Image (cartoon, grey):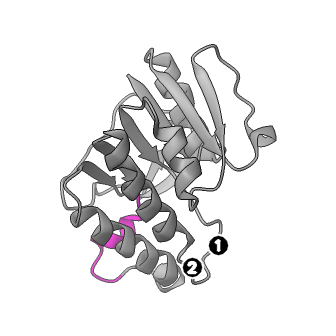
Amino acid sequence: MHIIIFGATGRTGSALIEHGLAQGHAVTAFVRDPQKLLIKHERLTVATGDAQNFAAVSEALTGQEAVISALSSGTLEPTTQLSSSTQTIIRAMAPQNVRRIIVTLSMGLLLSAPPPQFVNIDKEHHRIYEALQLTNLDWIAACPPSITGEPGQGSYRAVAGGTPGSYTISRY
């Protein structure tokens, strides 16, 4: 499968690249700065651009079969950068005939009272969730708890529409 990963130079994005390559997929890393991408592989292609730029995103989506977005704003301050990027990706998918998208969002979306320090990011992630709901794409919003750098244990528990009962998960 041909998979494109947005947010590929981040900790989660890098782990997704490694996992995709290990599973035998052809992976495209969409990055702003290719110097930050430390992974090299014969099945890894690098596409450079801003995820808010329709032309760059559309070109990178050519030939892809699925999108994974691990975009992060890197701040807890108010922003619309992530939702703007996601809306650009969604708009660019249809002309390229790409129907599948997975996005990582905050577990705070599933809590009745998310921690106050995450209120801005939860609002931004809610905008992304709403944008996905308005599409006819095959989409999944993965809302993991706090993501750690610990090695993966090989198992996890997914709960549709709820929290898994754990407050950490390895990015692997």
The residue wearing badge 2 is: 79
SS at mark 1? loop
Range of residues picked out in magenta = 104-113
Q: Is residue 111 magenta?
A: yes
Q: Is residue 88 above or below residue 118?
A: above
Q: Please tell me which residue lies in front, 116 or 68.
A: 68
Q: Please tell me which residue lies in front, 32 or 157.
A: 32
Residue 56 numbered mark, or none: none
Q: Residues within 10 Å of mark 2 (few under 14, many from 20)?
A: some
Residue 75 numbered mark, or none: 1
- Residue 26, image x and y in percent? 49, 21
- Furthest-right residue in view? 35
Pointer 2 and pointer 1: residues touching (CB < 8 Å)?
Answer: yes
Q: Is residue 51 magenta?
A: no
For the question of whether residue 149 can be seen, the reply is: no
Q: Residue at x 39, y 27 (%)?
A: 154
- Residue 63, image x and y in percent? 43, 29
Q: Amino acid at mark 1?
A: Thr
Q: Amino acid at mark 2?
A: Thr
- Residue 131, image x and y in percent? 31, 68
As measured in the structure, the alpha-carbon distance from the residue carrying label 2 to the one carrying label 1 is: 8 Å
